[in-house]
């Protein structure tokens, strides 16, 4: 695979692929690793591996402290997502519409590996196009408001053809994105929305989740839409985790390429397998590697993709934007502080004083 | 080795090379800068602080530098970078030293989620911590500084760091930031106080920092058990009043004053409830600082 | 019928006649008086109707003035995400 990765990214990839080796790192490497992992929103993921392998006591104290702090953030994130889904369902209780949970929220509610150590709290749901109006109305009644988008976000939303703007809850300030399709209808790739819906599996009492192959293909399509890596290394890691998780069943591999063909998503799948293998050592059966060559681009395109991907997994901006809308924040720092803080840092302590008006003397 | 052991050349060179790792309480901050004002400020305020080995893991990687481009010369600005990313809007270059202090506060608040953090001043007497939660009009920094002049040990003027495992308050002693009239008021309390320069035209007026006493810095590894929580309110021309506060009310107030309570979930709840359980809680209305300090000292001496 | 959802483990503290409850599911912290705390406690392990709650409350020494307050209270608890409608 062509393409150059910087030392810190190599270090991070090695740590993700071989977490057992972490106790052998020296302080300087740890310092570099913690920084890079945090910037790519993968410190939580790393922390999960460290915990799973029971290594917290075998790595330097400072590394353990930083990991613990990040895991606390990730745990809170999972809580926020679960509760938000609970609230969304409550808002939609009188709306008889099938709701498919997508991406991060789906991973959390279905307890899939990418959910662990995750730091994104937006909730994405997919409903039939005809129901968009009804769903929107119900959510607005439930305390959500349309978010005003800045020009960057507007571009993103136009590109992805979301019909509804993201909805932000007035009090919780959490964001719900209502989709009716997984890819723009005017895009080159046009997966059949109905096929996705039909294959969807139940999730709990009232929700549905995409079938395993479709989860993978959705993630791949998003990541490699139009040939640029929109989500960075974090999203590639998610893809790798999904492949490993579902890949334990042979039927998954057997059905993957045929499903990609049916949904016209062979090109993104090709890239997904190529980079998960190349960068993250994902085990992909030889037969699948062969079959997916149906989606292979011509060599110059592939070389370019290699280079782009390598560049894309190295962070350079703040907060790889898959969502730059007013998402739920974590940290409100300082009410009375006099530094010119950007207002987008918020802490959610969500304290509420709920004294019921039973006795006048106890009124608020 | 302490910072004061470096010659001014060594200090400048280490900071320029990113080889300066400062330990402040439980945190190690790697600082990189070529700005002379910041170099001087670090030498001035942090002389008593220990330096970490170069081969050490840092909690924060802080850099202060001007933005690239034309603004170097016309109304020069400075940026605060943490972990390689610029965190705030640019500040005027002459506010670089206070930007370092504020920026460091932000770093702690943003990252130290292995502690429960409250926005509060914390001082210590007889091994027990006295918290002064912040809210507008509390004057917590002035009170914190005042109590330090009365012999209380400084744990922090910004952050109460509570260890969830044992409920202990962990020190993060730093220069105390005082504003406007408070600067003169504390200076008038006499004793051997060392102040840094006064910066004007900050968003809230004048600011000056008080150098922490060597004792507070030397004992930064000594936590304190919970003792008292005092909710102060400065009311000009108002009545002076010190009254007990119901614990349930104190708890709710502290939730509002917390930095990361919401992130810590049950752990945060239990840690905060424990703090309230193990402290006595008070509300203090005051308009005269020396009198307030007397009152609090009496409280802590009971 | 109403109840606190099955796997939500509320955490309680009491100081004097005030109760503080933390809901790990919502991340919210609430301050409740005696009656509200009693009602919420009653819904922690079983589903109950509002009528049932009114009957239980009426036997407390601190009787609320107006039974309709219990309707409001349950409504508020629902709004706050502490209880949810349970199937009958």
Image: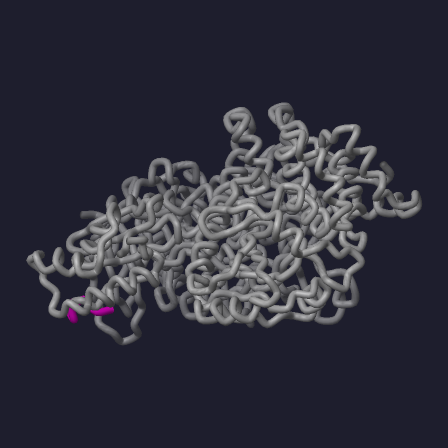
- Looking at the image, residue A84 sits to the left or right of residue A299; the answer is left
Residue B199 within the magenta-colored segment of the rendering? no
From the viewer's perspective, is residue A121 above or below residue A172?
above
From the viewer's perspective, is residue B113 above or below residue A282?
below
Q: x and y percent of residue A203 in the render?
A: 50, 46
- Looking at the image, residue B91 sits to the left or right of residue B122; the answer is right
Q: x and y percent of residue B154 in the render?
A: 39, 48
Q: x and y percent of residue A101 in the render?
A: 55, 52
Q: Quadrant of the C terminus of chain A?
A: bottom left
> For the magenta stretch, what is the residue range?
A359-364
Residue at 41% x, 56% y: name it: A349
| Coloration of the structure image | one colour
Examine the rendering and report whether any part of residue B3 can be seen.
no
Looking at the rendering, which quadrant does residue A290 occupy? top right
Examine the rendering and report whether any part of residue A249 can be seen.
yes
Residue at 63% x, 70% y: name it: A149
Q: Quadrant of the N terminus of chain A?
A: top right
Q: x and y percent of residue C6 in the render?
A: 33, 45
In the foreground, B270 or A105? A105
Residue at 80% x, 33% y: name it: A289
In the foreground, A34 or C5? C5
Q: What residue occupies the far bottom of the structure in this picture?
A: B237
Residue at 16% x, 71% y: name it: A360
From the viewer's perspective, is residue A25 above or below residue B57?
above
């Amino acid at each position: 695979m062509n393409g150059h990765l910087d030392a810190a990214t190599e270090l991070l990839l090695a740590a993700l692929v071989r977490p057992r080796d972490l106790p052998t790192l020296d302080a300087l490497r740890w310092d570099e690793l913690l920084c890079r992992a945090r910037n790519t929103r993968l410190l939580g993921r790393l922390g999960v591996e460290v915990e799973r392998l029971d290594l917290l006591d075998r790595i330097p104290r400072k590394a353990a402290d930083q990991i613990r702090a990040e895991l606390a953030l990730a745990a809170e994130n999972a809580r926020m997502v679960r509760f938000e889904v609970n609230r969304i369902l409550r808002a939609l209780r009188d709306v008889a519409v099938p709701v498919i949970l997508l991406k991060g929220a789906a991973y959390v509610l279905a307890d899939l590996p990418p959910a662990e150590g995750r730091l994104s709290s937006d909730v994405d749901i997919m409903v039939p196009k005809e129901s968009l109006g009804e769903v929107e109305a119900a959510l607005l009644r439930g305390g959500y408001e349309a978010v005003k988008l800045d020009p960057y976000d507007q571009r993103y939303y136009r590109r992805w053809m979301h019909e509804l703007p993201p909805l932000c809850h007035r009090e919780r300030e959490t964001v719900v994105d209502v989709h009716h399709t997984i890819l723009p209808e005017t895009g080159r790739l046009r997966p059949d929305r109905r096929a996705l819906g039909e294959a969807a599996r139940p999730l709990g009492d009232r929700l549905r989740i995409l079938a395993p192959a479709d989860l993978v293909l959705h993630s791949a399509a998003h990541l490699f839409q139009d040939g640029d890596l929109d989500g960075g290394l974090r999203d590639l890691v998610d893809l790798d985790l999904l492949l490993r998780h579902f890949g334990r069943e042979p039927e998954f591999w057997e059905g993957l390429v045929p499903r990609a063909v049916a949904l016209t998503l062979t090109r993104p799948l090709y890239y997904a397998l190529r980079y998960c293998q190349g960068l993250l050592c994902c085990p992909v059966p030889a037969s699948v590697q062969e079959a997916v060559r149906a989606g292979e681009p011509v060599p110059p395109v592939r070389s370019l993709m290699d280079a782009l991907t390598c560049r894309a997994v190295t962070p350079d901006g703040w907060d790889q934007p898959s969502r730059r809308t007013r998402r739920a924040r974590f940290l409100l720092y300082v009410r009375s502080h006099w530094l010119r803080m950007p207002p987008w840092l918020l802490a959610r302590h969500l304290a509420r004083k709920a004294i019921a008006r039973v006795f006048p003397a106890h009124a608020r | 080795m302490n910072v004061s052991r470096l010659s001014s050349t060594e200090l400048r060179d280490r900071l320029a090379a990113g080889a300066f790792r400062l330990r402040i309480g439980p945190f190690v901050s790697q600082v990189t800068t070529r700005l002379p004002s910041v170099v001087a400020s670090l030498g001035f305020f942090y002389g008593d602080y220990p330096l970490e080995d170069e081969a050490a893991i840092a909690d924060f990687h802080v850099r202060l530098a001007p933005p690239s481009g034309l603004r170097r010369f016309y109304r020069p600005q400075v940026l605060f970078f943490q972990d390689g990313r610029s965190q705030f809007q640019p500040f005027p270059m002459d506010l670089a030293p206070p930007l370092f202090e504020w920026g460091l506060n932000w770093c702690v608040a943003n990252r130290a989620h292995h502690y429960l953090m409250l926005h509060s001043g914390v001082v210590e007497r007889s091994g027990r911590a006295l918290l002064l939660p912040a809210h507008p009009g509390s004057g917590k920094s002035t009170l914190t500084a005042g109590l330090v002049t009365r012999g209380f040990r400084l744990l922090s003027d910004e952050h109460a760091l509570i260890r969830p495992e044992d409920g202990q308050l962990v020190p993060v002693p730093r220069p105390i930031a005082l504003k406007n009239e408070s600067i003169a008021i504390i200076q008038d309390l006499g004793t051997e106080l060392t102040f840094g320069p006064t910066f004007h035209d900050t968003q809230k007026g004048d600011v000056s920092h008080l150098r922490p006493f060597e004792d507070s810095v030397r004992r930064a590894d000594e936590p304190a058990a919970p003792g008292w929580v005092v909710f102060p309110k400065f009311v000009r021309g108002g009545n002076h009043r010190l009254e007990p506060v119901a614990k349930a009310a104190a708890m709710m107030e502290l939730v509002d004053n917390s930095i990361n309570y919401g992130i810590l979930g049950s752990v945060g709840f239990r840690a905060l409830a424990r703090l309230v359980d193990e402290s006595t809680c008070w509300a203090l209305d005051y308009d005269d600082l020396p009198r307030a300090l007397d009152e609090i000292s009496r409280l802590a001496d009971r | 019928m109403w109840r606190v959802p099955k796997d939500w483990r509320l955490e309680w503290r009491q100081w004097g006649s005030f109760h503080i409850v933390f809901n790990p599911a919502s991340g919210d912290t609430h301050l409740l008086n005696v009656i509200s705390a009693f009602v919420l406690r009653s819904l922690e392990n079983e589903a109950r109707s509002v009528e049932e709650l009114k009957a239980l409350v009426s036997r407390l020494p601190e009787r609320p003035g107006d039974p309709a307050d219990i309707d409001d209270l349950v409504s508020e608890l629902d709004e706050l995400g502490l209880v949810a409608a349970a199937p009958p």
